[in-house]
Image (spheres, rainbow, N blue to C red):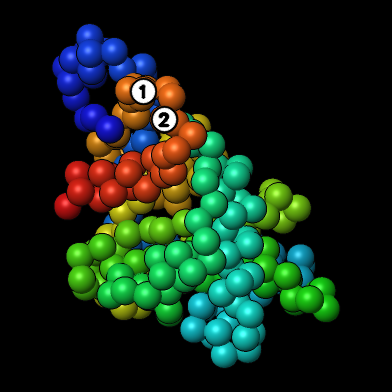
């Protein structure tokens, strides 16, 4: 992951392919956010039988919520633009990564539930986390919507819900990053996120014979590098 054209030339001379993907950051001025611009998407949830809950709320009414988040996350991860095929982590690793640690905000993560169905299917989610140990500046984790619930304004409604929660906490900014062709990037710009420096993904195979023995998690490396670059 590089942020300089000059460094990219150096990598190419050393045999790296790329850039394979471009990952722009974007930042939102939370206190200046006007939710009324998106009232149609928010109010339209009820027409589709959808209701938004915080993770804390859903944990109190659904004993299987973590397993259901795990399945939803994996289903949507496979639709996300990535430089390599995604590798599924175990359920235990997922719980450790998402639901534990000081960055986790049970009140700042939200899920849309289809309350018109007997199984109350999870339709989509969005996550905020503490990027610097306080609520002043937050980061966005995963935001996703299942295929059969897309084109209904659900992603915008989920993000508006999260932004309004952050605004009530006194949060000043939210930082996020997306692959430039990911529709979520355009949604963030529509919400008012301002473009920031972008990361470029380069790739080099050192020894093809060992690829089958390596567990590839390049997306984690990208997100870690983006967070470090934005700090």
- How many residues crowd around disc 2 within 10 Å: few (fewer than 14), some, or many (20 or more)? few
Mark 1: which secondary structure? loop
Residue 30 falls in image quadrant: bottom left
Q: Are marks 1 and 2 in contact (CB under 8 Å)?
A: yes
Q: Is residue 14 above or below residue 185?
A: above
Which residue was labeled with disc 1?
207
**Depth order, front residue of 42/54:** 54
Confirm whether residue 36 shows in the render: no
Instruction: Tell me where residue 158 appears, x and y as whole percent.
Output: 54, 64
The extreme top residue here reads: 13
CA gap, disc 1 to disc 2?
Answer: 6 Å
Residue 137 falls in image quadrant: bottom left
Q: Is residue 157 above or below residue 82?
A: below
Q: Is residue 42 left or right of residue 223?
A: right
Instruction: Tell me where residue 69 appears, x and y as whole percent.
Output: 58, 68
Which residue was labeled with disc 2?
210
> Which quarter of the rendered picture does the N terminus lie within?
top left
- How many residues crowd around disc 1 within 10 Å: few (fewer than 14), some, or many (20 or more)? few
Q: Residue at x 62, y 61 (%)?
A: 72
């Amino acid at each position: 992951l590089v942020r300089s054209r000059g460094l990219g030339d150096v990598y190419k001379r050393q045999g790296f392919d790329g850039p394979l993907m471009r990952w722009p950051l974007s930042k939102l001025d939370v206190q200046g956010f006007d939710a009324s611009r998106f009232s149609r998407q928010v109010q339209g949830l009820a027409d589709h039988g959808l209701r938004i809950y915080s993770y804390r709320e859903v944990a109190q009414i659904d004993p299987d919520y973590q397993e259901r988040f795990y399945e939803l996350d994996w289903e949507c991860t496979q639709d996300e633009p990535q430089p390599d095929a995604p590798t599924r982590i175990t359920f235990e690793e997922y719980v450790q990564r998402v639901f534990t640690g000081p960055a986790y905000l049970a009140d700042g993560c939200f899920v849309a539930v289809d309350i018109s169905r007997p199984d109350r299917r999870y339709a989509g989610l969005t996550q905020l986390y503490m990027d610097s140990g306080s609520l002043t500046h937050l980061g966005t984790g995963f935001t996703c919507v299942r295929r059969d619930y897309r084109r209904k304004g659900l992603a915008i409604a989920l993000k508006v819900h999260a932004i309004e929660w952050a605004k009530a906490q006194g949060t000043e900014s939210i930082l996020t990053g997306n692959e430039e062709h990911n529709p979520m990037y355009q949604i963030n710009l529509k919400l008012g996120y301002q473009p920031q420096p972008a990361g470029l993904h380069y790739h080099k195979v050192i020894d093809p014979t060992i690829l089958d023995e390596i567990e590839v998690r390049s997306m984690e490396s990208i997100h870690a590098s983006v967070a470090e670059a934005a700090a």
